[in-house]
Amino acid sequence: MVQQQALDRAFAALADETRRAILTRLGEGPATITELATPSGMTLTGIRKHVDVLEAAGLVTTEKVGRVRQVQLGTERLDDAMAWISYYQRLWERRLDGLQVYFTLRKGTES
Amino acid sequence: MVQQQALDRAFAALADETRRAILTRLGEGPATITELATPSGMTLTGIRKHVDVLEAAGLVTTEKVGRVRQVQLGTERLDDAMAWISYYQRLWERRLDGLQVYFTLRKGTES
């Protein structure tokens, strides 16, 4: 059962280009805050805030390794987001199928 | 090419339970603002604001039919959102495959 609040947080977290770029980067493997900040040109504080949003949404997990905070992907919530979008796409396709049947039937009666 | 701002708007629009419920309802067919408001118990103004957010994100289109505003699904942006999530899931699966190869190789050297 999908929790609505968890979905709210997941979609809100995805609604930002920098956060999506962080997730893409983490797809290659875990990274430190510094490593995440380097390509973006953002401050460590800025990246840390984005990572906090992603962590609250369950999209990443973080771990202190010595004095460094290591960030890695978590995906449970993204699976839920994907499931929701898939469900919605199916609804939409069903509607298109219905329209197609309607126009085919109409064409049949007109010819 | 996916527009980042369009993705921002699509995900932000999806980050709300009422708006997701509106999209699900529209999966059954077009509806007026009043029809959308009825099951939710929300005011017409409240629903109209949610529809505006969905329309700005390209997830629905609206049309004036006489004095009534008809709302229906549009899906371009949702396809982009789906494509983005699919891409990310593939990155994640590739990472899992990598881990599995690593552990299988490790097990091989240990036995």
Image (cartoon, coloured by chain):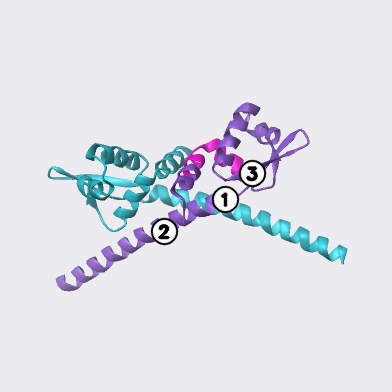
Chain colours: A cyan, B purple
Left or right: where does residue B68 sit relative to residue B107? right
**Residue linked to disc 1:** A88
Do the residues bearing badges 2 and 1 touch, measured as CB atoms within 8 Å?
no
Circle 2: element type: helix
Which one is closest to the eye, mark 2 or mark 1? 2
User: Residue at coordinates 69% horizontally, 59% vertically from top-left?
Assistant: A97
Circle 1: element type: helix
Q: Position of residue A73 (x, y in %)?
A: 31, 51
Assign the magenta stretch its main secondary structure. Answer: helix
Which one is closest to the eye, mark 3 or mark 2? 3
Which one is closest to the eye, mark 1 or mark 3? 3
Q: Do the residues marked 2 and 1 share a common chain?
A: no
Distance from disc 2 to disc 1, alpha carbons, whole Å, reads 18 Å
Camera-nearest residue between A6 and A27: A27
Magenta residues, start to end: B11-24
Among numbered discs 3 and 2, the one appearing first in the sequence: 3
Q: Is residue B47 above or below residue A109?
A: above
**Residue linked to disc 2:** B87
User: Residue at coordinates 58% horizontally, 31% vertically from top-left?
Assistant: B49
